[in-house]
Amino acid sequence: MAWVSAEGVGVAPTIPTLGDRRASGHSIIGLAVFDHSTLRAEAVGRCWSRGRLLAWLAGSQAL
């Protein structure tokens, strides 16, 4: 199962916050993959204005 999320900083518990604060004004784009009994999650970018502006993180790895 795969889950993609654009949530406020710290809202999705398994997605890293990248050191950002909750009141930063943007959301973290996260990707989580549940494979059998293993959960892997990573932040792949940031977004502002409900997705109107996206910034992908360099060095993000596909799960």
Image: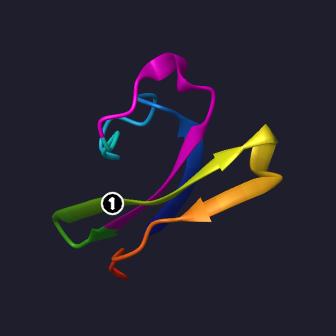
56 or 37: nearer the viewer = 56
In the image, residue 30 lies at what x, y percent? 46, 55
Q: Residue at x 16, y 65 (%)?
A: 37
**Residue extending furthest toward the bottom:** 62
Q: Residue at x 45, y 66 (%)?
A: 57
* Quarter in which the N terminus is drawn: bottom left
Q: Residue at x 68, y 59 (%)?
A: 54
Colour convention: rainbow
Q: How many marks?
A: 1
Task: Please tell me whether residue 37 belongs to the stretch shown in magenta.
Answer: no
Instruction: Tell me: 17 left or right of 56.
Output: left
Q: Residue at x 17, y 66 (%)?
A: 38
In the image, residue 46 lies at what x, y percent? 56, 51
9 or 59: nearer the viewer = 59
55 or 13: nearer the viewer = 55
Instruction: Tell me: 61 left or right of 55.
Output: left
Task: Write down the quadrant of residue 17 in the picture.
Answer: top left
Instruction: Tell me: 15 left or right of 38.
Output: right
**Residue extending furthest toward the left:** 37
Task: Please tell me whether residue 28 belongs to the stretch shown in magenta.
Answer: yes
Crowdedness near tag 1: few (<14), some (14–19) or many (≥20) residues, C-alpha within 10 Å: many
In the image, residue 11 lies at what x, y percent? 46, 28
The disc labelled 1 sits on which kind of residue? Glu
Vertically, is 39 above or below 1?
above
**Which residues, given as a range, are shown in magenta?**
19-33
* Residue with the mark numbered 1: 42
Vertically, is 4 above or below 1?
above
Task: Write down the quadrant of residue 8 in the picture.
Answer: top right
Name the secondary structure under disc 1: strand
Vertically, is 12 above or below 24?
below
* Quarter in which the C terminus is drawn: bottom left
Instruction: Tell me: 2 left or right of 14.
Output: right
